[in-house]
Amino acid sequence: MAGTGVFAEIIDGDVFKYYADGEWKKSGSGKSVAIINPTTRKTQYKVQACSQEEVNKVMESAKVAQKLWARTPLWKRAELLHKAAGVLKEHKAPIAECLVKEIAKPAKDAVSEVVRSGDLVSYCAEEGVRLLGQGAFLTSDSFPGNERTKYCLVSKIPLGVVLAIPPFNYPVNLAVSKIGPALIAGNSIVLKPPTQGAVAALHMVHCFHLAGFPKGLISCVTGKGSEIGDFLTMHPGVNCISFTGGDTGIAISKKAGMVPLQMELGGKDACIVLEDADLDLVAANIIKGGFSYSGQRCTAIKVVLVMESVADDLVEKVKAKVAKLKVGPPEDDCDITPVVSESSANFIEGLVKDAKEKGATFCQEYKREGNLIWPLLLDHVRPDMRIAWEEPFGPVLPVIRITSVEEGIHHCNASNFGLQGCVFTKDINKAMLISDAMETGTVQINSAPARGPDHFPFQGIKDSGIGSQGITNSINMMVKVKSTVINLPSPSYTMG
C-alpha cells in the first residue's frame, strides 16, 4: 500500500511530506492540499502546501548540490541512475496503486507506466554516457584564411538547476523523462508534481532517494500552483524549465526570461483517412488512439477527418468497437474510467452540448455519472462546433467528413495546435506528401499518434510547444556547449 513499508517515512499522519536536502519534511506552513479520487470524488490523499520560503531553501540546496554533482564521473552518475531504475521497478505496485486512486488510470496501465519509467531511466544512463563522453576537436585551418594555429576543444556542460513540471496524466513517466536527462547531464532537479498525481510522484522520488543520490540534488515540492507556481517558474535560481501540460505553459514561457525552455502543451491530433485505407485498421487505431485512458492523452486522436465516400463504413466499424469498451472504475481495468476532475467533466459536457445544439449526429447516447463519461462518437461535426477545434481531454471524438485531402490538411493546419497527426492510406507516396504538408511535430503513417518509444523525438509546433523531447534531445537540451581554444605560437601540421 501507498505510504507503507519502505515508503513509511514519506508520510506523517495522513499527509505526505515533501522532499528536500535528502530528507522527507513537513511544511512550516501547517497547510495541506487535498487530492480528490476521481472515482469516489472524495479526498484520497493529502500533500504538504510548501511555502515560498521553503522553495527558496530548496533552490539554494539544489545550486550547491549541482556543483558537486557536476564533478561526479559520468559512469558514477549512470550507475546511480541504473540503481534508481531497479528500485522503481521493484516497487511498481504501490506506485501504480497511487496512479489508480489519484488519476483513475486503469490498473494494468498504471503498472506499465512505472515499468516504462524504469526502462527510460536506464536508457537515459546509457545514452548519456555515450553522448556526453565525447566532444569535438576543430582546427582553425579548416576555415578560409586561417593557418593551423588554433585547436578548439568542444564539450557539453550542465545548465545548473532544472525545474521539472510534469502533467497529471503521466505524473511518473513524464517526471522521469525530465529527471533522468537532467541528472545524467550533471544538473540538479527540482520537481513540482501536479496535484493529481503528486503522491505517485513522491513515491517515485523516494526510489531515487533509496538509490543513494546526494542530498539536495533532487527535490520535490508540493503545493498550490497559485501560491508557489509562478514563484518557482520565475525563480532566479532556475536555469532550465521542462514543462508538460496545458496552456499554463504559454504563460510560463512569457515570464521565464533568459531560461532554456522545453514545453509540450497539448494537441488537437488529426486523423486523416483516405479512400484506400484499411478501414478495420483505422477503426482499431481510432479506438486505441481516441479512447485509451478515456482520451486524456496529449497524443490522443482528437478529430477524425475522413473522406465522405468511406465515412459511413468507418463510422459503423468504430461504433461497433465503442460498444465493446468496458466502462467503470480503474481498479477493474476498465477501458473507460472517470476523467480526472469534475471541472474536466463539466468542460467536456460543455463541448458535447454545443455539438448537440449545432446538429452533430450522436452515435451513442451521451451518458455521465459524476466524473465518468461514457465513450461518445460524434458524426457530421462541422467547423463551427467547438469540438472541431478544442481539446476535450475526454472520451468524446468528433468525425468531420471531407471531400478532398486538401480539405483535411487545411483543417489540421488551421488549428492552433501542432503536436501530432496521423494518416491512413495504402499509398506511401500520398502518405509522405500529406505528412510533409501537415504542420505537426510528428506524423504517424497507418497508426494512431503516440509518444514513444521514449527515445524517439517528441515535439510540437505552434501552441503545442517549444523544443523537442525524447531521451537524446532532452539530454542535449539540458546542457550547453563550452569551447576551449588552444592558441599555438606558430602553425602546426601533422605530417603523417
Image: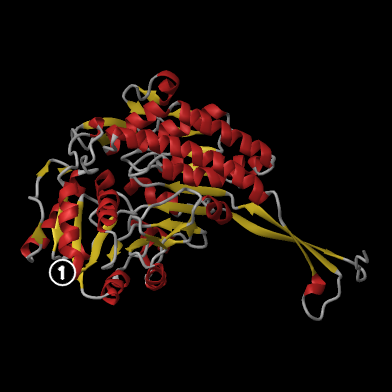
Q: Is residue 53 above or below residue 312?
A: above
In the picture, measured across the screen, residue 143 lies left or right of residue 11, that is: right
In this view of the protein, which residue sits in the foreground, 30 or 89?
89
In this view of the protein, which residue sits in the foreground, 149 or 187?
149
Q: Amino acid at mark 1?
A: Arg
Q: Quadrant of residue 109?
A: top left
Position in image of residue 364 (x %, y %): 10, 51
Write the residue at 60% across / 39% down: 65
Q: Looking at the rendering, in which quadrant would you find the C terminus?
A: bottom right
Q: Looking at the rendering, in which quadrant would you find the N terminus?
A: top left
Q: Is residue 394 above or below residue 335?
A: below
In this view of the protein, which residue sits in the foreground, 416 or 356?
356
Q: Residue furthest bottom?
A: 145
Write the residue at 28% across / 56% down: 282
Identify the residue under disc 1.
Answer: 382
In the picture, measured across the screen, residue 446 lies left or right of residue 239, that is: left
Position in image of residue 235 (x %, y %): 47, 52
Q: Residues within 10 Å of mark 1 (few under 14, many from 20)?
A: some
- The colour scheme used to paint the residues is secondary structure
Q: Is residue 177 above or below residue 302?
A: above
Q: Secondary structure at mark 1?
A: loop
